Amino acid sequence: MNQKQLLLLMAYSLIVISLIFLPKYATLNNGKEIVLKTEPLDPRDVFRGDYVILSYEMSSLNLNETPYDYAFMEGELIYAVLSEKETYWTIDSISHAKTAVEDNDVCMKGIVTRNEGDTIMIEWGIESYFVPEGEGRQIQEQIENVSVIVSVDTDCSAVVKQLLLNGERLVSNEKHE
Amino acid sequence: MMEDEKQRLWLQKEAMTWENDGIINDAQLNAILSRYDMPKDSIDENATKKDGTSQTIQVMSILGALLVGVGAILFVAANWKELPTFAKLLLLFGTTYSTYFAGWNLKYMKATRPKLGESLLFLASLLIGATIFLNAQIFNVNADAHWLLLVWLIAILPYGYAFNSSSILFLKIFVFALWTIFYVGQNTELFVSSFGIFMFYLLLGINLYGLGQMHLRFERFSHFRELYQGSGLFFILISYFYFSLETPFRHTLTRITPLTGTLQALFILFMLISVIMIVQSALMCKKHENRKYEFIVLILTFTGMLAIWMLTIFKDSIKVSQVQDYGLTQLEPGIATLLFIFFNLMYFILTIGSILIGYYRSILSFVNIGMGFFMIGVLHLYFTTLYRSLPRSLAFIVGGLILLLFGGYMEKKRRIIINNIKEGDSA
């Protein structure tokens, strides 16, 4: 194997990794910021190692209260339109395909993980927040007052940007610039 | 005479270096060596014998690389916040690619320490994984996201062949197997999803074994055959061991939920590839009589797989009518016993098949895999049958005696087979 082949191989893996994470980088820096309310989980499950498991009001949706196009199956993609209410952003409607959103609204996509008839469980890809070792317990104890700043792009992808405790920044997360 | 031997050794060494450097391919190397009555196999053997410590060096280097790699991953997982994101990325990408470069330099460019170079290339492939997980951490990607493993696999996909490295190929198989666990079990608890995971592993075993057979068609990569086939046999036997247990049928089968659309598509893809691999094995079997055991093992594995698949489809019709403890339904006891007998029989036939393949193809690792699983199967049968009917103290004594006596007997048989293989090789 010569040097040129080696460089090509290295470039290949670099491209693979970049293709996955560059869009997230773009979302984090250029996406629209929204604030979501978290919901407390069973304390035994909240903190695992060095990350916090986040659950949201929108992680579980009652189909009787949320407009949708047609029934969802487990494993399907789901698109939600969110708008800002008093403090937090909440879901207005859900669908199987991306729909047009107004300037002040955003869309988010997730995956239906469970269907229990009238209620569906959704994973939005923003359920983990990594914290420095040892800082998780502090968050765990106050999880009921935690909200999350999420950056959402026009492709409906979301990335967690920051945790807030009573509206104040809780855990530092370095700048990504 | 002495001069001749010296020249032959020089040529051996040079030819191997040319192959390593990519100047000649494996077929050309064979052609050159056979011109001087030195088949490559004997050279490999001679080289191994000459450098008695090389195997140890290789193992130690790989272990060292593994430890450094695991350490790097844990270091990343420790979430070091002192460094800004850019510095973290620079550090990890820099370390990864400079390790690749150092490995390439030692294995190909200078070719002074190929084994250390090989270990560094393996380490760099581990560091690729660490890089991916660090990135995921920076962007708060969900912690149990299965696709991160898939990205790792894709990122190192060409490296095994490009660097002619068995350890990187092994890593790829390991990462893929790990991804299967996360992907199949993403929405259910591991206990329930284990049934589906081992169904996938059965097919994965067939596919890996078939892939190994395919490598015989490509002289340049034919030495990877054993790795693929050995891994294939391992996955086949470990899956059959799972299905030879009582729990999957008595408690798990009735609780499994239908696969999602993408999982179904993946399952069908695995099945189709398995069929192709079996057809390929049948064609090889026609040409070479001694390949029949491989075909038998594959076709038996696939038949068992179809039986398990049918069970998942018709599971509702073999459930007991009344609800059992904890609100769980179970299989009819008679049917559960029948399945237990059937899959244990299949398991033992396949372990013996693995030993036979190893014997007829002169591959020691296959004999060892077969023997190992045979022993595990015997122990399992003991604890599920005889153990229950004896007083506890006596049961332990009997179990220990079975282990000692049967272990000794199996070891004796294993040595006989290994000696036969070696005698066959030298003849």
Image (cartoon, rainbow, N blue to C red):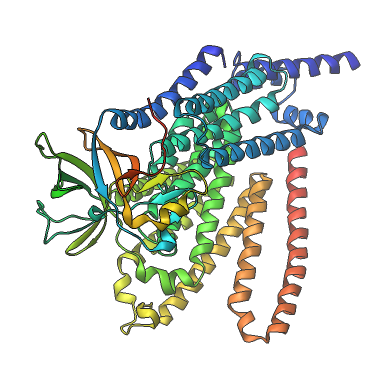
Q: Residue at x 56, y 62 (%)?
A: B349
Q: Residue at x 16, y 49 (%)?
A: A91
Q: Residue at x 73, y 69 (%)?
A: B403
Asked whether B277 or A162 is in front, the reply is A162
Asked whether B370 or B102 is in front, the reply is B102
**In this rendering, position of residue B420 left or right of residue A122:** right
**In this rendering, position of residue A131 left or right of residue B118:** left
- In which quarter of the view is residue B118 placed? top right
- In which quarter of the view is residue B32 placed? top right
Give above or below for A101 relative to B187: above
**In this rendering, position of residue A153 left or right of residue B13:** left
Give above or below for B297 relative to B331: above
Quarter the C terminus of chain B occupies: top right
Quarter the N terminus of chain B occupies: top right
Q: Residue at x 60, y 53 (%)?
A: B354
Report the label total.
0
Asked whether B56 or A83 is in front, the reply is A83
